[in-house]
C-alpha cells in the first residue's frame, strides 16, 4: 500500500463526486493490507466506510446538489438478478464493492458510481449527525443484518464474542432491539475492559489462556438462568469461538457466524447432535443491503445506537499506515481517517 497523488476525478453521467469527509477503517482493510483480497480489482483505492459532501453532480442524476452531506453503501448489489428481486441483495452473486471494484474513500475525493445510485445507495446525513458518525453507518448496517438474521429481539439473552468495534455495536444494537441481557466475551482482557467501560454489558467474560470451555459455559449458564443464552454472535474471526459457541446456546438458540475466517482455515467442527436435539439455528452474515444502511443511519440519528464514542483514534490521510497499525496493535477501538484534516 502506498500514498499517491492522482488527478481529481470528475462526475460522469449518472455519478456523484464527493469530497471525502471521513472514511473509517476496519479489520478488513488490515487484512487486505496484509494478504490482499481475491475479490479486489487492483491496483485500487481502498476504503469503504464513507461519508462525504457532494461537490459535483453528473448528468441524469436527480435529487442531489453540491453541499449535500451523504453516506454511501459499500456493498453494491445489481438490483436486477433473481436473488436481489427475492429480497436478498446482500448475497447478490453480481455484487461489486466500493474500494474493491470502484475507487474507495481513502482519498480526498471519491466518485459515487452510477451502480450505487441505481440501487438507492446514497443516504442524506441529517445536520446533527457528524461525518464521523455517518462513516460508521456501514459497519452498523452489517451488524443490523446479522441481528435480523439471528432474530435478536425483545427479551433475548445475547452473548457477543469479540469486543472490537463490531462487538461493541452488537452490544448496543441488541439493547436497542429489546434484549433482556447482553454479555461480552473476549480473549484479550485489556481490550475487553476498555470496551466494557463504554458499552456496559451485563457481564464481561475474559477468557484467559488456559481457561477451559466448561468454565466459560458455567459462567454463561449461571448468568443467563441455567440454560444458556438465546443468541451467540461471533464478532471475531476465531475458529475456536465458532466451534465452542453452540454449547453456550439454550434450546432453540441461534448462532450468528458474523466474523469470517481466513481463507484456507475456514473449516470448523461442530456437534450436529446439539443442533439436532436442541433445535438450534446457525446463520451466516454477508455485509448489508442499501435498506440496512438507511435503517442504520436512522438508528444513529435517533440516538438509539450511539457510535461516536467508539472512535478512539483519528488520522490524516497521509498517516493511513499508522491508522491501520492502530487497529493491528489493539490500541484503538475504532479508527477514522480524515482526508482533509489539514485544510
Image: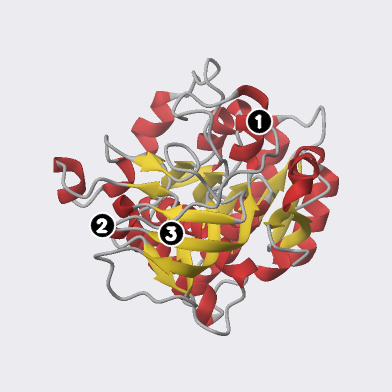
Q: Nearer the viewer, mark 2 or mark 3?
A: 2
Task: Using the image as rendered, state which of residue 61 and residue 169 is in the foreground.
Answer: 61
Q: Residue at x 40, y 26 (%)?
A: 273
Tell me: residue 140, above or below residue 96.
below
Crowding at dot 3, Cα within 10 Å, few <14 / some 14-19 / many 20+, comes out as: many
Kind of element beneath mark 2: helix
Task: Using the image as rendered, state which of residue 115 and residue 239 is in the foreground.
Answer: 115
Tell me: residue 183, above or below residue 131.
above
Quadrant assignment for the C terminus:
bottom right
Residue 270 percent coordinates (x, y): 48, 24
Task: Tell how many labels.
Answer: 3
Q: Quadrant of residue 327?
A: top right
Tell me: residue 46, above or below residue 41.
below
Q: Residue at x 45, y 54 (%)?
A: 111
Residue 33's disc number: 1
Residue behind mark 3: 152
Crowding at dot 2, Cα within 10 Å, few <14 / some 14-19 / many 20+, comes out as: some
Q: Quadrant of residue 211?
A: top right
Tell me the CA gap for discs 3 and 1: 33 Å
* Mark 3 or mark 1, earlier in chain: 1
Residue behind mark 2: 118
Q: Residue at x 73, y 29 (%)?
A: 212
For the view shown, which residue lies furthest in the top direction? 264
Kind of element beneath mark 1: helix
Kind of element beneath mark 3: loop
Tell me the CA gap for discs 1 and 2: 30 Å
Residue 81 percent coordinates (x, y): 16, 42
Amino acid at each position: 500500500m502506498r500514498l499517491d497523488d492522482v488527478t481529481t476525478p470528475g462526475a460522469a453521467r449518472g455519478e456523484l463526486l464527493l469530497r471525502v469527509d471521513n472514511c473509517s477503517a476496519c479489520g478488513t482493510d488490515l487484512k487486505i493490507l496484509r494478504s490482499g483480497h481475491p475479490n479486489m480489482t487492483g491496483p485500487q483505492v481502498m476504503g469503504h466506510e464513507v461519508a462525504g459532501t457532494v461537490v459535483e453532480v453528473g448528468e441524469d442524476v436527480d435529487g442531489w446538489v453540491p453541499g449535500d452531506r451523504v453516506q454511501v453503501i459499500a456493498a453494491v448489489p445489481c438490483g436486477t438478478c433473481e436473488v436481489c428481486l427475492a429480497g436478498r441483495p446482500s448475497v447478490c452473486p453480481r455484487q461489486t464493492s466500493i474500494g474493491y471494484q470502484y475507487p474507495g474513500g481513502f482519498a480526498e475525493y471519491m466518485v459515487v458510481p452510477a451502480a450505487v445510485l441505481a440501487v438507492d445507495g446514497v443516504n442524506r446525513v441529517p445536520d446533527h449527525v457528524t461525518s464521523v458518525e455517518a462513516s460508521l453507518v456501514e459497519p452498523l448496517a452489517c451488524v443490523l443484518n446479522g441481528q435480523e438474521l439471528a432474530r435478536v429481539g425483545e427479551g433475548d439473552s445475547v452473548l457477543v464474542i469479540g469486543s472490537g468495534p463490531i462487538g461493541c455495536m452488537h452490544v448496543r444494537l441488541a439493547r436497542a432491539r429489546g434484549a433482556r441481557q447482553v454479555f461480552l466475551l473476549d480473549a484479550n482482557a485489556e481490550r475487553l475492559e476498555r470496551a466494557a467501560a463504554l458499552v456496559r454489558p451485563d457481564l464481561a467474560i475474559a477468557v484467559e489462556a488456559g481457561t477451559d470451555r466448561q468454565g466459560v459455559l458455567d459462567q454463561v449458564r449461571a448468568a443467563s438462568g441455567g440454560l444458556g443464552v438465546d443468541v451467540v454472535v461471533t464478532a471475531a474471526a476465531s475458529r475456536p469461538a465458532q466451534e465452542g459457541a453452540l454449547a453456550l446456546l439454550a434450546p432453540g438458540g441461534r448462532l450468528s457466524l458474523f466474523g469470517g475466517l481466513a481463507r484456507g482455515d475456514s473449516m470448523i467442527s461442530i456437534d450436529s447432535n446439539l443442533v439436532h436435539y436442541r433445535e438450534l439455528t446457525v446463520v451466516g452474515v454477508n455485509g448489508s443491503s442499501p435498506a440496512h444502511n438507511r435503517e442504520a443511519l436512522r438508528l444513529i440519528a435517533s440516538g438509539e445506537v450511539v457510535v461516536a464514542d467508539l472512535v478512539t483514534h483519528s488520522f490524516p490521510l497521509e498517516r493511513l499506515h499508522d491508522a491501520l497499525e492502530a487497529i493491528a496493535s489493539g490500541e484503538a477501538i475504532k479508527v477514522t481517517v480524515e482526508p482533509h484534516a489539514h485544510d
